[in-house]
Image (cartoon, grey):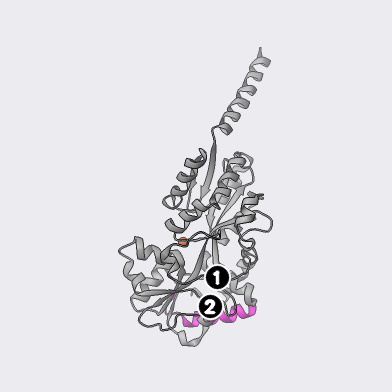
Amino acid sequence: MIKRYALGTALALIVSATAAQASGEVNVYTYRETKLVQPLFDAFTKESGIKVNVISASSGLEQRIKTEGANSPADVLLTVDLGRIDDAVKAEITQPIKSEVIDKNVPAQYRDPDGNWTGISMRARVIYASRDRVKQDAITYEELADPKWKGKICIRSGQHIYNNGLFAAYVTKHGEAKAEEWLRGVKANLAQKPSGGDREQARDVAAGKCDIGIGNTYYWALMMNSDPDKKPWAEATKVILPTFAGGGTHVNLSGVLLAKHAPNKANAMKLIDWLAGEQAQKIYADTNYEYPIRAGVDVNPTIAGYGKLNADPMPIAKIATNRKAASTLVDKVGFDN
Ligand SMILES: [Fe+2]
């Protein structure tokens, strides 16, 4: 009797597990704001019939997935910035994405050589220059250390992930010694102690505190198109796409990772492939003002107005190896002091 009961329970468990898989769900853990990603998930569900359960947080998702271990419901981690992508890989919560769709549509420099992550869209780290006071329309990152900008540059903390990515790219391009010299030069040119977010750099340019601010491409578009209070900050500035001397513009990613113990792996792969598809790429371009990672999808007109993006060819995985060095240099030169 006891034996039969136990067998019944075991069967019931098998049946319910099968039912959960057949119901077509995928669990997404994300750092992205719900309003930014919900249109994507709605479109995916409409097309695939697969329900997307979203768990969003502003921090600690890697640790949460790690703590949940083999029982983690996480299928997919959707995140931004090479720093966070790299943190997730280091936390060993991922498994390789094996997909011909991804390999075909995402350029190799924007994918992990080991398959642990893939970029889904791009953003560039650029200059918000005063329309009144900055005459030039082109600039290099190297030039930010030129004394001609003394007292004229505004930027957020050098330890913020966006700057860490840019500085790590500089280290990758020029080596640590040159990067240190450059960071000292940029530091010497700052109008004020690093503070605020990217939008505040445009605010301070508009207020005349500095001539150039450093920020990501999508913030300027958001200020211009979706935030009437901040529109004057965008209007006072023009976006210049800087390049490395002899190279291109520093690009960072929003990316996706497949969780190590994904319980709905097949659906997770469907979602990941779908994110690189034309419809999702169009939504990223128009809702989030990000650059599509897939060739042939139009950039949003506001973003296109910055000029043609010539992305630097350095692989993102290579830049990620210099994150620590960049962070150490920021402390060493007292960038944030
Ligand atoms: Fe951001």
Q: Residues within 10 Å of mark 1 (few under 14, many from 20)?
A: many
**Residue nearest the observer in this picture, 67 or 102:** 102
Residue 234 shown left or right of residue 284 in the figure: left
Q: Is residue 183 located in the magenta-colored stretch of the structure?
A: yes
**Residue nearest the observer in this picture, 124 or 318:** 124
Nearer-N-terminus badge (1/2)? 2
Instruction: Give the quadrant of residue 134.
Output: bottom left
**Residue nearest the observer in this picture, 28 or 123:** 123
Judging by the rendered image, the residue that carries numbered circle 2 is 141
Q: Residue furthest front?
A: 296
> Do tag 1 and tag 2 residues touch (Cβ < 8 Å)?
yes
Q: Main secondary structure of the magenta part?
A: helix
Q: Amino acid at mark 2?
A: Tyr
Counting from the top left corner in percent of width and height, residue 303 is at: 44, 66
Judging by the rendered image, the residue that carries numbered circle 1 is 250
Q: Amino acid at mark 1?
A: His
Q: Which residues are magenta?
A: 176-195
Q: Which mark is residue 69?
A: none
Counting from the top left corner in percent of width and height, residue 183 is at: 55, 78
Counting from the top left corner in percent of width and height, residue 187 is at: 50, 79
